[in-house]
Image: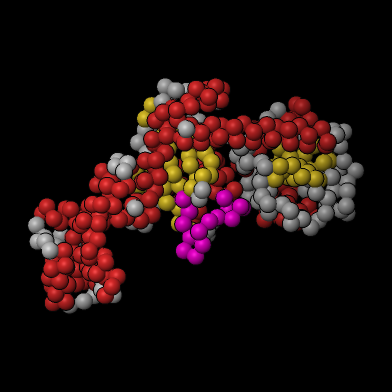
Amino acid sequence: MAITLGKLCANVESTYGMKLLAGAAGLENFVRWVHMIEDREVPSFLHGNELVFTTGIAQEGSGWMLDFASSMLVKKASGLVLNIGPYIESVPENVIEYCEKHNLPLFSVPWSVRLIDITYDFCHRIVASEEIEMGLAAAMRNLIFMPQEEKVYKPTLERRCFYPDSLYTVVALEPVYQDKSVLSEDESRNLKLQAQRLLNRTGRLFSLFFYDTKLIVILQEFNEKQIDEFIDMLQRICEHHGVQYKLHAGVSPAGKGYLFISDAYHKAVMGLRIAKLHNRKSVRYQHMGLYKLIVSVNDNDILNELYSESLGVLEEFDRKNGTDYMTTLRCYLEYNSSVQEVARVTFVHRNTVNYKIKRIREILKCDFDYENKLKLMLAFFIKDLL
């Protein structure tokens, strides 16, 4: 998994004399890289989640440090390390108080320690952590799309303590914009890091990666409450940070073994599709109702045939004549054949609704008895998923 600042800096006091002065609450921040910065103006190449070192060699006095710490917070740095020596004699109390208030981890390191040794060590461990994460994600992706090759991926998974007799659940998350289709690189990275941070707090194992526009999360031995809390918190964080998208989620049932993960992935994606379709925050596969029956049919030709036999002629009539009979019929079925409710929802007179329903019956050449209504509703569900 991506390495946290707390894990990266474990035992640094005994190894390098590096001490935490403030911001302990931010030690769960992830660290993407390490930078040395001496300019007062923080450069634009910082993207967030960097650990920044400075010696203060380009500065005078100590008044610059508060502004420097403030700029680190704006740039969403993981933490700040001040090299105590000829240029930074001590850390002002107001800087310590500021970092503590804003949960920005602030460290000091003595001048006698060679910063190249620390930064090399940290960078090496960051790269190693990323390689582990990427290797695990690759094994999980291959397990999903090529489950028959389980034996090839088993050693990688077991080295990371993902065992074949464990219980797995898959969550598929997708941000949906109104005006664009995909996240930017920074947005994708931030969403992934927020998800990792929340999952790390559970103390349980997980793997996550982007596939197409979806963030796929594979959870080991998570219960339903933990999963619901994770999704809810991630959605709240996104809303709190003012993102311009809605985050929808689909959740698979829990099942045992590697082979289940592939099936769970497809069920989670189906739940996600229903969540997006009905503008719901999340949908569990178990709660998909009739949609489960549809997605269990592997032959799309059969589904297309059922749809065409039921609603094809009505859709074609709407297309040729500019009518909205498909919309009227679905509303009529969803509101249990209540003409009054259809009139209210569609903002037309009851007589207009009655006329439309009469014409729909004529076009479809069927009565709206229980069996036909069920067949037509099933056809609408098929249309949703095809």
Horizontal side, residue 31 vs residue 383: left or right? right
Q: Is residue 225 visible?
A: no
The magenta-colored residue range is 174-188
> Per the image, is 143 magenta?
no
Horizontal side, residue 253 vs residue 41: left or right? left
| Vertical placement of residue 289 versus 168, above or below | below
> Per the image, is 177 magenta?
yes
Residue found 52% across the figure and 39% down from its top: 208
Q: Is residue 257 visible?
A: yes
Rendered image quadrant of residue 257:
top left
- Provide residue 88's location: percent of width, then percent of height: 85, 45
Residue found 19% across the figure and 68% down from its top: 342
- Provide residue 314's location: percent of width, then percent of height: 22, 65
- Provide residue 22's location: percent of width, then percent of height: 68, 42
| Vertical placement of residue 331 versus 307, above or below | below
Looking at this view, is 177 or 328 the one in front?
A: 328
Horizontal side, residue 341 vs residue 236: left or right? left
| Vertical placement of residue 270 versus 239, above or below | above
Looking at this view, is 117 or 64 the one in front?
A: 117
Residue found 44% across the figure and 23% down from its top: 164
